[in-house]
Amino acid sequence: MPQPSKVLGKAWADEQRTLRVAKLQVALRELLATSPHFTFEIGCGHGHWLTAYAQKFPEKFCLGIDLITTRVERSVRKQTIGQINNVHFLKAEATELLDALSPEHQLNEIFILYPDPWPKTKHHKNRFINQENLARLAKHAPNGAKLHFRTDDLDYYQWTLEHLKQNPDWKLLETEAWPFERTTFFEERMKAKRDLITEKHSA
Ligand SMILES: C[S@@+](CC[C@H](N)C(=O)[O-])C[C@H]1O[C@@H](n2cnc3c(N)ncnc32)[C@H](O)[C@@H]1O
């Protein structure tokens, strides 16, 4: 029998999540009103990569999110100083943002660059890549949409490769070239670069 305090704690956390998702739904409806199909970066950090990508591809609308307020603020500063009108940054948690999307919103491209690797086995459950989140991404990705994953961590690379191989919605593209290079804040500190590109391919 779980302790009442634990039950109350989970109920409260669930309620807070529901409120955040509802707020995001309102924000996204307005933000994506004229650009419902967009490029999405999860864990944009200081926004180096996505601001450069948006400048290179002005026809694409790009949305970057991160959990950490100061990183989002730095990203917004780059967008403002550069007057780059096709990129927007939000402080949001990735699963909450995905749950807040409406059916008309589509992820044309997804980028996950140097996600937190959570190296200890007991922390693997915190890794963003899992079957539940691959399904979340697939739900809003049209067939042909590409998911780009880059890490310095060999174990997380292998983990992601295995999850993708087992997933019915994402097909690995073995020979696809990485579409755009701009060194990210974390990349400067990393020793290795391992890429996976996969395409949404549901029956
Ligand atoms: C190692 S950093 C990499 C940042 C950036 N991509 C780079 O290469 O410089 C990982 C980032 O992902 C963010 N992050 C981790 N989990 C997240 C989640 N569930 N939703 C949104 N952002 C997340 C962290 O706050 C952190 O800024």
Image (cartoon, grey):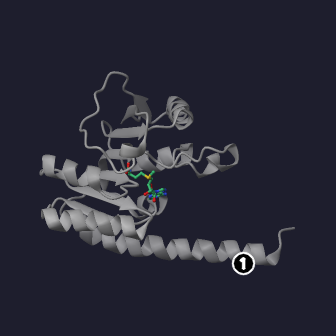
> For the point 22% across and 63% down, which residue is it?
78
Choose between 93 and 69: the one closer to the eye. 69
Q: Quadrant of the C terminus?
A: top left
Number of residues whose C-alpha sits closer than 10 Å to that of mark 1, classed few (under 14), some (14–19) or many (20 or more) = few
Q: Which residue is mark 1?
A: 8
Picture coordinates of residue 175 (x, y %)? 33, 21
Picture coordinates of residue 62 (x, y %)? 24, 55
Choose between 142 and 75: the one closer to the eye. 75
> For the point 40% across and 75% down, which residue is it?
23
Q: Count of labels shown?
A: 1
Residue 196 in which image quadrant: top left
Q: Secondary structure under badge 1?
A: helix
Is residue 56 found left or right of 110 in the rendered image?
Answer: left
Picture coordinates of residue 116 (x, y %)? 50, 49
Q: Is residue 18 above or below residue 130?
A: below
Picture coordinates of residue 148 (x, y %)? 36, 39
Under mark 1, the amino acid is Leu
Can residue 57 be seen in this snapshot? no
Can residue 193 be seen in this snapshot? yes
* Disc 1 Cβ-to-ligand 1 distance below 8 Å: no
Choose between 108 and 201: the one closer to the eye. 108
Q: Quadrant of the N terminus?
A: bottom right
Residue 156 in which image quadrant: top right
Q: Is residue 68 above or below residue 193?
A: below
Is residue 44 found left or right of 136 in the rendered image?
Answer: left
> For the point 51% across and 37% down, which residue is it?
153
Q: Quadrant of ligand 1?
A: bottom left
Choose between 21 and 86: the one closer to the eye. 86
Q: Is residue 110 above or below residue 51?
A: above
Q: Is residue 104 above or below residue 117?
A: below
Is residue 175 found left or right of 53 in the rendered image?
Answer: right
